[in-house]
């Protein structure tokens, strides 16, 4: 049993919650976790240090392309972080996820 885990970020908690709720409402995600993180990265030749919100999306592998398209449309970032991987999961969690979305 495989699930898709996709990770993205948003600049504010409000934006992260909006994104998470949209994905749940569209049935593209069964569960979305959000946590505050501190990020350091280069942007426009400057070193940036900022608080962000990491968004972990749990979904079906076959929804990968739809999730990527949705994130490009609703992310507030010019270049949204979109990282994903398939993971094996316990049968009970898989059954719940499959039934939910």
Image (spheres, rainbow, N blue to C red):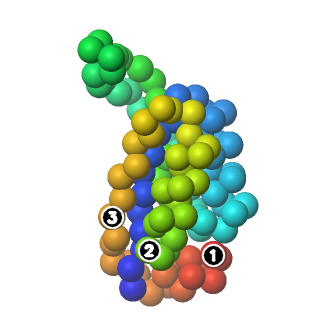
Quadrant housing the N terminus: bottom left
**Residue 5 on image: x %, y %:** 41, 62
Crowdedness near tag 1: few (<14), some (14–19) or many (≥20) residues, C-alpha within 10 Å: some
Alpha carbon of mark 3 to alpha carbon of mark 1: how far? 18 Å
Residue 101 - label: 1
Towards the viewer: 77 or 52: 77
Crowdedness near tag 3: few (<14), some (14–19) or many (≥20) residues, C-alpha within 10 Å: few
Residue 33 - label: none
Are circles 2 and 1 on residues that touch, CB within 8 Å?
Answer: no
**Residue 77 on image: x %, y %:** 50, 32
The residue shown at (42%, 69%) is: 4
The answer to which of marks 3 and 1 sits earlier in the sequence is: 3
Residue 85 - label: 3
Towards the viewer: 75 or 23: 75
| 35 left or right, relative to 73 | left
Which residue corresponds to mark 2? 61
Alpha carbon of mark 3 to alpha carbon of mark 2: how far? 9 Å
For residue 54, above or below residue 45: below
Alpha carbon of mark 2 to alpha carbon of mark 1: how far? 12 Å
Q: Is residue 20 visible?
A: yes
Report helix, strand or loop for mark 1: loop
Towards the viewer: 53 or 81: 81
The answer to which of marks 2 and 1 sits earlier in the sequence is: 2
**Residue 66 on image: x %, y %:** 54, 64
């Amino acid at each position: 049993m495989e699930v898709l885990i996709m990770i993205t970020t948003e600049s504010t908690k409000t934006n992260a919650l909006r994104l998470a709720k949209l994905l749940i409402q569209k049935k593209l995600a069964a569960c979305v976790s959000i946590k505050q993180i501190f990020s350091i990265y280069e942007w426009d030749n400057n070193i940036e240090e900022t608080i962000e919100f990491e968004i972990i999306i749990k979904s079906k592998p076959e929804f990968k392309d739809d999730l990527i398209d949705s994130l490009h449309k609703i992310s507030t970032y010019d270049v949204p972080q979109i990282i994903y991987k398939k993971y094996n999961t316990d049968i009970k969690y898989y059954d719940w996820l499959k039934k939910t979305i």
